[in-house]
Amino acid sequence: MRMLKRQCSRTACKAAAVATLTYVQAERTAVLGPLATYAEPHTYDLCADHTRRLTAPRGWDVVRLAIDLSEPEPSEDDLLALADAVRAAGRPRRTEPAPQPPGRPRLRVLPDL
């Protein structure tokens, strides 16, 4: 199963996420680390720009784990998946109904005019 690229959680930011921010409120600590495998509630995915500019409220500590801030280049698998999707979209659609076994009523969908 392929995961889709997640985008930054900041409002109006369309950049790809590269880090995940979580909070430990009891300890007044914000933890910024590598992008989590799955999007979880109460976490925030951030792009490289928002990761660099992150600040925490006064009295809070920020723990910054090692993060690769560069966006990964598309892999060969990504390019092959894209090519397969384009090919599938370009295939002609079947317009004839599938054959029915004899003795059964046939229903057909008629195109809108």
Image (cartoon, rainbow, N blue to C red):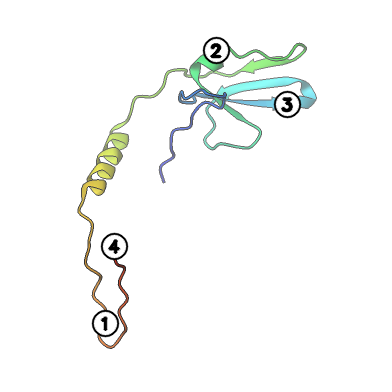
Give the foreground label among 4 and 3: 4
Please state which of the two labelled residues, at mark 3 or mark 1, is closer to the viewer: 1
Which x, y percent locates residue 32? 60, 21
What residue did someone put label 1 on? 101
Residue in view at x 40 percent, y 42 percent: 2
Q: Nearer the viewer, residue 15 or 41?
A: 15
- The mark that comes first in sequence, 1 or 4, is 1
For the residue labelled by badge 1, is the local secondary structure a helix, a strand or a loop?
Answer: loop
The one of 96 and 111 positioned closer to us in this rendering = 111
Residue 63 location, quadrant: top right
Name the residue type under label 1. Answer: Pro
How crowded pointer 2 is (Cα within 10 Å; few <14, some 14-19, many 20+) is rated as few
Report, in whole angstroms, how far the alpha carbon at label 3 lies from the one at label 1.
Answer: 63 Å
Location of mark 2 (residue): 52
Left or right: 39 in relation to 85: right
Kindly state the secondary structure of the residue where label 3 is placed.
Answer: strand
**Disc 3/disc 2 C-alpha distance (Å):** 20 Å
Residue 81: quadrant of the picture: top left
- Kindly report the distance in space between the C-alpha atoms of the residues bearing marks 2 and 4: 54 Å
Extreme-front residue of the structure: 113
The reply to whether the C-beta atoms of the residues labelled 3 and 1 are less than 8 Å apart is: no
Cα distance in 3D space between marks 1 and 4: 23 Å
Question: Residue placed farthest to the right in the image?
Answer: 26
Residue position for label 4: 111
Residue tagged by mark 3? Answer: 24
Q: Earlier in the sequence, mark 4 or mark 3?
A: 3
Secondary element at image label 4: loop
Which amino acid does the dot numbered 4 rest on?
Pro
